[in-house]
């Protein structure tokens, strides 16, 4: 091991002598050699950093979406229309009630253009009545045409003589069954309900 180191020194002796001559020449001309402080590694101090704060996630509200299919939409529309109709009927009933406080039914018919039956139904449902009708507004009874009754009675007697049934006679005259009975009672016409057919003559067999 020592012999190896000696051989290395001997091998580098010429280079070392050359380097020494260069140094001596440098110093002779006024040069100076500054010895540098050897570098010493100093580790940096350990930094104790606080743990990084995690950013709080903003609470995002879920997006609420309303999905309405066709069937549900129809139900909603149907219910809305029913509510509107009910509100319209209530407003109509209240309007008729106000009219009934000062008007007769005939006057209300002219004002609102509704039929008598409709106004009666609304009044019965609402529990109110119209003002009593005057004599001029009361419906007149149906007047009987005496001349026409007499003419129809003569025709009934004629149809009876030729053997028409009651229904046939009524249809020929063009009157209702009630009117036909009224004429029979009024003019004391004994019109049979059914005519008996004449019996067929018997033939003697030979």
Image (cartoon, rainbow, N blue to C red):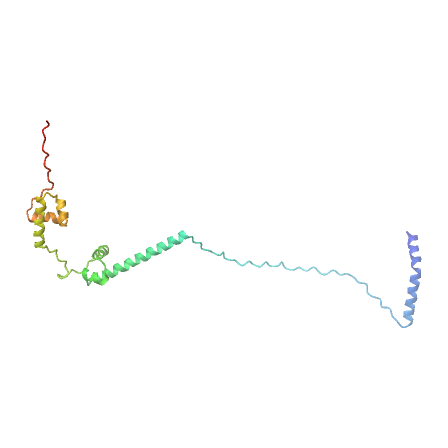
Rendered image quadrant of residue 194: top left
Q: Residue 39's x, y, as percent?
A: 80, 63
Q: Residue 40's x, y, as percent?
A: 79, 61
Q: Residue 78's x, y, as percent?
A: 35, 54
Q: Is residue 44 left or right of residue 105?
A: right
* Image height of 186 relative to 44, above or below: above
Residue pictured at 93% horizontal, 55% vertical: 7
Note whether residue 177 is visible.
no
Judged from this view, the residue extending furthest toward the left is 188
Q: Is residue 205 left or right of residue 42?
A: left
Q: Is residue 128 left or right of residue 57?
A: left
Residue pictured at 93% horizontal, 52% vertical: 3
Q: Nearer the viewer, residue 132 or 190?
A: 190
Note whether residue 76 is visible.
yes
Rendered image quadrant of residue 191: top left
Q: Residue 49's x, y, as percent?
A: 65, 60
Judged from this view, the residue extending furthest toward the top is 206
Q: Nearer the viewer, residue 127 or 136?
A: 136
Rendered image quadrant of residue 113: bottom left
Residue pictured at 34% horizontal, 56% vertical: 81
* Image height of 202 relative to 140, above or below: above
């Amino acid at each position: 091991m020592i012999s190896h180191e000696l051989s290395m020194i001997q091998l580098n002796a010429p280079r070392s002598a050359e380097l020494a001559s260069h140094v001596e020449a440098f110093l002779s001309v006024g040069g100076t050699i500054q010895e540098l402080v050897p570098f010493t590694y100093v580790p940096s101090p350990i930094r104790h950093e606080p743990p990084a704060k995690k950013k709080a996630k903003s609470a995002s509200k879920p997006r609420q979406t309303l999905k309405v299919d066709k069937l549900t939409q129809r139900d909603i529309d149907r219910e809305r229309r029913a509510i509107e109709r009910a509100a319209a009927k209530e407003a109509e009933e209240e309007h008729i009630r106000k009219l009934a406080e000062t008007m007769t039914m005939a006057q209300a018919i002219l004002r609102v253009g509704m039929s008598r039956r409709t106004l009666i139904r609304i009044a019965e449902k609402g529990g109110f009545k119209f003002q009593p009708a005057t004599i001029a507004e009361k419906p007149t009874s149906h007047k009987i045409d005496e001349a026409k009754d007499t003419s129809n009675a003569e025709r009934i007697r004629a149809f009876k003589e030729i053997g028409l049934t009651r229904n046939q006679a009524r249809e020929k005259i063009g009157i209702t069954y009630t009117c036909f009975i009224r004429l029979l009672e009024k003019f004391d016409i004994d019109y049979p309900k059914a005519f008996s057919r004449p019996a067929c003559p018997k033939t003697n067999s030979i």
